[in-house]
């Protein structure tokens, strides 16, 4: 399973766009990328998942370049409530490996 | 509420005692995961099931830990002879696997304190 590397922490002001990049140099052809968000004392919550190019939903966008060795989670106009830890996961489409979390990126949104 | 349910939410136990946690996944979900999380760390994979079959158990997991999912529905995680280092949040998640992993839904967790 491809190892992921993310920044340990990031700070942002309210209303700004936040981009969190994840490196996954050893991603395999059939692997896909998933991002989760976790608030203190809660379980992680799915944000977005993608395989290539760009995926957008109501809360975030996921950009994946052609070589797929990295991906960027983009949060538009963050608010204080977006303060959380964000995890990037690489999963196999064969489904024969479990979901493995790294240390994540702790995002702090400042008023 | 049709989300993932974990019981108990909190457990305080004395060192050396056995504890058992229960997880009720979303009803149609065939995959069930157990994780352990300590402060400042990401969830650490423990084991996972597809229906009643245990697919993988972390090599880091001591033999004191065992999990079951007897009928492919709820699951239990037992820790025997607890140690202070077992103090953590234990998270359960479920997902519907249909040839590829879909979104995993997590429960609120069981916070274990070993004194």
Image (spheres, grey):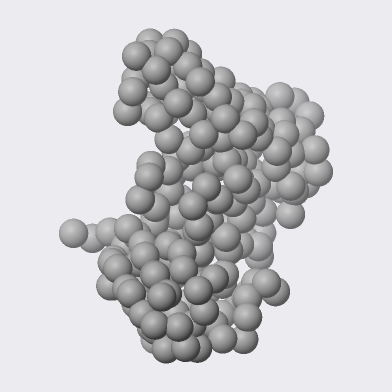
Q: Residue at x 76, y 33 (%)?
A: A69
Q: Is residue B45 above or below residue A60?
A: below
Looking at this view, name the residue that lies furthest to the front. Answer: B115
Quarter of the image where the C terminus of chain B is located: bottom left
Residue B52 is situated, as x and y percent measured from the top left of the image, at: 48, 82
> Is A63 positioned to the left or the right of B5 in the image?
right
In the rendered image, is residue A35 in sight? no
Looking at the image, which is closer to me, B107 or B86? Answer: B86
Looking at the image, which is closer to me, B5 or B19? Answer: B19
Q: Is residue B108 above or below residue A4?
A: below
Q: Residue at x 34, y 14 (%)?
A: A111
Residue B56 is situated, as x and y percent measured from the top left of the image, at: 63, 74
Q: How many marks?
A: 0
Quarter of the image where the N terminus of chain B is located: bottom left
Residue B66 is situated, as x and y percent measured from the top left of the image, at: 52, 84
Q: Residue at x 60, y 45 (%)?
A: A103
Q: Quadrant of residue B11?
A: bottom left
Residue B29 is situated, as x and y percent measured from the top left of the image, at: 39, 66
Looking at the image, which is closer to me, A74 or B115? Answer: B115
Q: Residue at x 64, y 31 (%)?
A: A7
> Is A47 positioned to the left or the right of B2 in the image?
right
């Amino acid at each position: 399973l491809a190892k992921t590397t993310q920044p340990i922490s990031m700070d942002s002001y309210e209303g700004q766009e936040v981009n969190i990049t994840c490196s996954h140099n050893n991603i395999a052809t059939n692997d896909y990328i998933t991002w989760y968000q976790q608030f203190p004392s809660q379980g992680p919550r799915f944000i977005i998942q993608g395989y290539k190019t760009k995926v957008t939903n109501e809360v975030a966008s996921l950009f994946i370049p052609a070589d797929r060795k990295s991906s960027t989670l983009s949060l538009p106009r963050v608010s204080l409530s977006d303060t959380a830890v964000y995890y990037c996961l690489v999963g196999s489409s064969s489904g024969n490996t479990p979901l493995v979390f790294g240390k994540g990126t702790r995002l702090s949104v400042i008023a | 509420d049709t989300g993932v349910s974990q019981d108990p939410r909190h457990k305080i136990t004395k060192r050396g005692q056995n504890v058992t946690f229960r997880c009720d996944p979303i009803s149609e979900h065939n995959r069930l995961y157990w994780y352990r999380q300590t402060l400042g760390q990401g969830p650490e994979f423990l084991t996972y099931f597809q229906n009643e079959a245990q697919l993988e158990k972390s090599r880091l997991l001591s033999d004191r830990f065992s999990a079951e999912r007897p009928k492919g529905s709820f699951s239990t995680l037992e820790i025997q002879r607890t140690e202070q280092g077992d103090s953590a949040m234990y998270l359960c998640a479920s997902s519907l696997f249909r040839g590829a992993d879909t979104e995993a839904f997590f429960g609120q967790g069981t916070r274990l304190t070993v004194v």
